[in-house]
Image (tube, grey):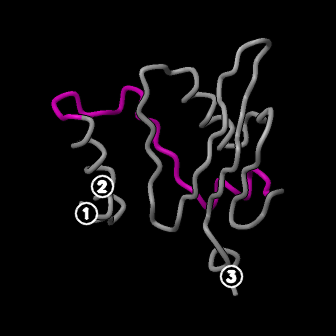
Amino acid sequence: MSVEATGAPLRVSELGLIRGERVILSNINFVLDHSEILGVVSNRIEPVNYLFRILLLLENPSSGSIVYFNNPLIKRRELIKKIGFYSCQMDLLESSTVLENLLLLASMHGLKKEKAL
């Protein structure tokens, strides 16, 4: 049985990040299954940047755990061969709404509208 077949590709549990006295991320929990796309919309860019830096193994969280493909000790080099990352910074279609942009990305990955929503 392949590693991918044994569970969800991504499990995030009780993820937190503290910088000095500031709590940047607190109690983030989610599971991302095969063929799902994670999109984050926020009015504050800093927590989103830190979340993706942690998910891409560029930053260590203060608390919680991230498990990729049932492997809590996966190395970044191994991870980037298995996932895709698309930064929306300056890459959204300005003539489209956020929802239209997300649906476009979903369709590019073969997801139907009903599944993407």
Callout 2 secondary element? loop
Residue that lies at the very extreme toward the right in this rendered image? 73
- The mark closer to the camera, 3 or 2, is 2
Q: Residues within 10 Å of mark 2 (few under 14, many from 20)?
A: few
Which residue occupies 80% across, 32% down?
A: 62
Judged left or right of residue 72, residue 107 is: left
Which residue occupies 53% across, 65% down?
A: 33
Q: Earlier in the sequence, mark 3 or mark 1?
A: 3
Q: Which residue is mark 3?
A: 2
Residue that lies at the very extreme toward the bottom in this rendered image? 1
Amino acid marked by disc 3: Ser
Residue 96 at x, y percent in the picture: 18, 35
Whole-Å distance between the Cαs marked 1 and 2?
5 Å
Q: Which residue is mark 1?
A: 114
Amino acid marked by disc 1: Glu
- The mark closer to the camera, 3 or 1, is 1
Amino acid marked by disc 2: Leu
Residue 63 at x, y percent in the picture: 79, 37
Callout 1 secondary element? helix
Q: Residues within 10 Å of mark 3 (few under 14, many from 20)?
A: few
The quarter of the displayed image where residue 6 is located? bottom right
Q: Earlier in the sequence, mark 3 or mark 2?
A: 3
Q: Is residue 77 above or below residue 16?
A: below
Residues marked 1 and 2 touching at CB (< 8 Å): yes
Magenta residue check for 60: no
Q: Quadrant of the N terminus?
A: bottom right
| Dominant secondary-structure state across the stretch colored magenta | loop
Q: Which residue is mark 2?
A: 117
First to last magenta residue range: 74-97
